[in-house]
Image: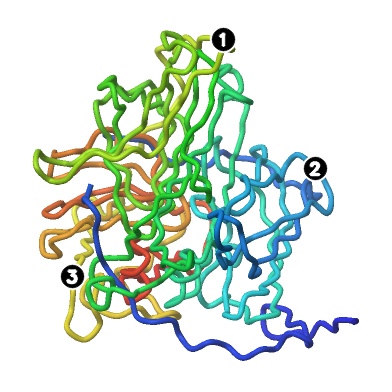
Amino acid sequence: MSVMLLKKGGYMVRSNSRRGFIKQAALISLTAWPVAARAASALIEKIAPRPTVDLAIKLRAFARTVSLYPDKPTDVWSYEANVVNGRGGSVRTSGNGFLGPVFEVHQGERLAVEYINDIPEESIVHWHGLDVPADQDGHPHHTVPTGGVFKYDFQVTNRAGLYFFHPHPHGKLGNQVTKGLVGVFIVRDSEEAALGLPNDQDEHLICVQDRRVSADRQFEYLTGGMHDRMMGMHGNELFINGELNRTKIVRRGSQRLRILNGSNARLYNLAWSDGRDLEIIGTDGGLLEKPHNVKSMLLAPAERLDVLVDLSELKEGESLSLQSIPLAAGAGSPFDIMTLTASAEEGSRFVVPPVLSKIELIQESEAVNLNNLKTFKLVPTRDHGWTIDGVPYDMHGASAKETVKFGDTEIWEFDNTVAGMPHPIHIHGTPFQVLSRQSGNFTGAMDLGWKDTVLLLPGDKVRLLKRFNTHKGLFVYHCHNLEHEDVSMMRNFVVQ
């Protein structure tokens, strides 16, 4: 059957797919299983515009079934991607589960992505952590309906790192992610390549997601009433890369783990089962300046970690588990996230250099509001639920405080002294550095390196430095507990 494309505002609608919009998905949530430095500045390199497209991709969101369990199939929503033009190896599947494809690109490349929405709700794609123009960022006012097509065209200016993509329709995000709509975006660059880090079979993606699964093997959402809405959606089953299998057979040598917390609301407190240090070499926006060793590390929704582990001493068949451990004695039991089992094959050992990368620090004196900080309070309200500054989300507006002059650097302070629960705050656009944290508890490496998401624990005040020097336009900042974001814990800011 031929398909006619009708122009409708900023998107295209396929006339044979004009099914009605589903009303705004249920208001939100907030829950928990065991709840369980200063960094740098303009992570974005000065890269000359690319006149031609290096990689053209067709990306479709659609409904399908997957065989997660041997007895019954599970209905999910997924992303599938096909390379239309460019390197075929730039896009690969993440496995046999519900996690979407993995894009692997090089810094400086120009991408053209044709997004096709074939799920029965309006949606759009946000490239989490990538610094792209406002009209390419997946703002909620750019959602397209069922049958809609949105065409992206942007250059990847970020340094090497683990990024990802997911829907961003206001009020529907938590449900769409729960159903399976998450994909992975890996950026490579020359600085990282020069290190000779473990790669290929010794580099592992670990996207951690929990799901609430019913007796008939279906994903459930907001079935816990007000508790789910107030605490965030937590599951009874843990998946790695969209699959139930949480064991990897690895060589007896150095391994690199690229870890993404892809859960809606759950925090993980990562540690090794044998008590060895976590050797952290990178966070949200790529490599740290030098390795950072800690016994445990909190990882909030949307945060990423880059970890090295040497398994040379393991014998064939021996295992080491990455666990989530309680924050305090008596606050629950550890549980395994991923088990690494040594094979007979001996791999190479990577000698970690004292310096991994060069990171420019933003000087505090660079901030135009050094003596007039912008403070954003994370508070619940009777009328709107979770909010920033007690006001609901306005899709099209931004206050004077949320208006920034292009080229300026500002200090933003987030105040979580009232809310009484953790909130991971994500700011779109340029990355930022964490300047200070009022609470010194459980920080690990959570404030190091290039950041796009920062976790605020109860009682925290966190100050950060951010440059607004790459793109003008309307962007959002919000809590990345998806149920909090969906209700009203999101606001716009405008760079002009």
Q: Is mark 3 on a helix, strand or loop?
A: strand
List the residue tagged with mark 2. Answer: 88
Question: How far apart are the alpha carbons under marks 1 and 2?
Answer: 30 Å
Q: In which quarter of the image is the N terminus?
A: bottom right
List the residue tagged with mark 3. Answer: 379
What amino acid is labelled 1 in the image? Answer: Glu
Q: Is residue 200 left or right of residue 29?
A: right
For the point 41% across and 67% down, the residue is: 214
What amino acid is labelled 2 in the image? Answer: Gly
What is the quadrant of residue 495 in the picture? bottom left
Viewer-side residue, 171 vs 215? 215
Locate residue 270, reporting x and y percent: 30, 36
Q: Is residue 21 left or right of residue 88?
A: left
Count neighbours of disc 2 (C-alpha within 10 A) and say few if under 14, some if 14 to 19, many if 20 or more.
few
Locate residue 224, reporting x and y percent: 28, 73
Closer to the N terminus: mark 2 or mark 3?
2
For the point 70% across and 88% down, the residue is: 18
Q: Is mark 2 on a helix, strand or loop?
A: helix
Locate residue 107, reporting x and y percent: 64, 38
Viewer-nearest of discs 1 and 3: 1
List the residue tagged with mark 1. Answer: 346
